[in-house]
């Protein structure tokens, strides 16, 4: 259970060069669950995540945690669609977020070994992270985010370019993280993945929030034409 939720979004809007990317949107994310942000490519999913994470400036409205922004930022992690690897070993990638928190080297190394085993990279600790496969890099990025036990984890299409096996491994890690109490907010346009993982769905199109409902309601009885078309695999603009 997090100490920084619920997350309350009121009339929030993001603009760039005069163009509205997101909003205005209003919703509240409660303490527990796995929120999936859905919509076609270019709908604004990444911009919405970045807005919630606080890395883009609001043009209007508010995004409010139950703690101050500095404390909230320290309790979050973000995993990008194309993971950024430090040009160091797998071990150093895993220990890095702990070392900047002044965790003793011995403890950090032990945690790195534990997480490497969890993601199947225990034999690759000394290998450069830059030579890993796409699936291995994504698992490493996720482990690097989770190793410091964030209260809230943002993910932007974490399985977009992965094969079935790697996708299943990532989803297993996410479900375990959720069970351990991490609040997850992730973007995907993969309907199957959303059905497997989501407890609730935010559906956006052209930067506007069209639906926000429990996952079972969204998938069985979507209220808007756009959401129903998206679920049917139709092209929507």
Image (cartoon, grey):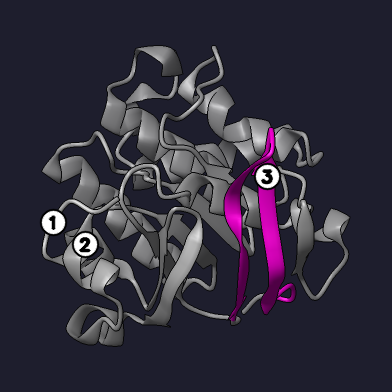
**Residue 35: assigned label:** none
Residue 207 x/y as whole percent: 50, 55
Tell me the quarter of the picture where residue 182 sits. Answer: bottom right
Mark 2–mark 3 CB contact (< 8 Å) = no
Can you identify the residue that label 3 sits on? Answer: 15
Tell me the quarter of the picture where residue 109 sits. Answer: top right
Can you identify the residue that label 1 sits on? Answer: 234
> Could you tell me which residue is drawn at 77 percent across and 34 percent down?
100
**Earlier along the polypeptide chain: callout 1 or callout 3?**
3
User: Along the horizontal axis of the image, is 70 left or right of 205?
Assistant: right
How many residues crowd mark 1 within 10 Å: few (<14), some (14–19), many (20+)? few
Residue 76 x/y as whole percent: 66, 54
CA separation, marks 1 and 2?
Answer: 6 Å
Residue 57 x/y as whole percent: 77, 45
Residue 94 visible at all = yes
Residues drawn in magenta: 3-29
- 61 or 237: nearer the viewer: 237
Mark 1–mark 2 CB contact (< 8 Å) = yes
- 102 or 50: nearer the viewer: 50
- 87 or 95: nearer the viewer: 87
Label 1 element class: loop
Can you identify the residue that label 2 sits on? Answer: 230
Residue 159 x/y as whole percent: 29, 43
């Amino acid at each position: 259970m997090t100490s920084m939720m619920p997350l309350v979004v009121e009339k929030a809007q993001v603009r760039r060069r005069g163009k509205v990317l997101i909003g205005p949107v209003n919703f509240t994310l409660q303490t527990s669950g796995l929120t999936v942000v859905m919509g076609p490519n270019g709908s604004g999913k990444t911009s919405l995540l970045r807005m919630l994470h606080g890395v883009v400036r609001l043009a209007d409205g508010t995004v409010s945690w139950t703690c101050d922004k500095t404390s909230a930022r320290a309790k979050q992690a973000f995993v990008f669609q194309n993971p950024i690897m430090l040009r160091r070993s797998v071990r150093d990638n895993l220990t890095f977020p702990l070392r900047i928190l002044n965790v003793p080297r011995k403890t950090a190394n032990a945690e790195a070994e534990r997480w490497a085993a969890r993601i199947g990279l225990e034999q690759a600790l000394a290998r450069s992270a830059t030579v890993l496969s796409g699936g291995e890099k994504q698992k490493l990025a996720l482990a690097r985010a989770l190793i410091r036990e964030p209260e809230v984890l943002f993910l932007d299409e974490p399985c977009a370019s992965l094969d079935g096996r790697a996708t299943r491994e990532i989803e297993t890690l996410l479900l375990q993280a959720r069970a351990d109490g991490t609040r997850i907010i992730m973007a995907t346009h993969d309907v199957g993945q959303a059905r497997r993982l989501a407890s609730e769905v935010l559906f956006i199109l052209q930067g506007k929030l069209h639906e926000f409902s429990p996952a079972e309601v969204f998938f069985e009885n979507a209220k808007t034409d756009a959401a129903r078309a998206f679920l049917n695999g139709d092209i929507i603009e």
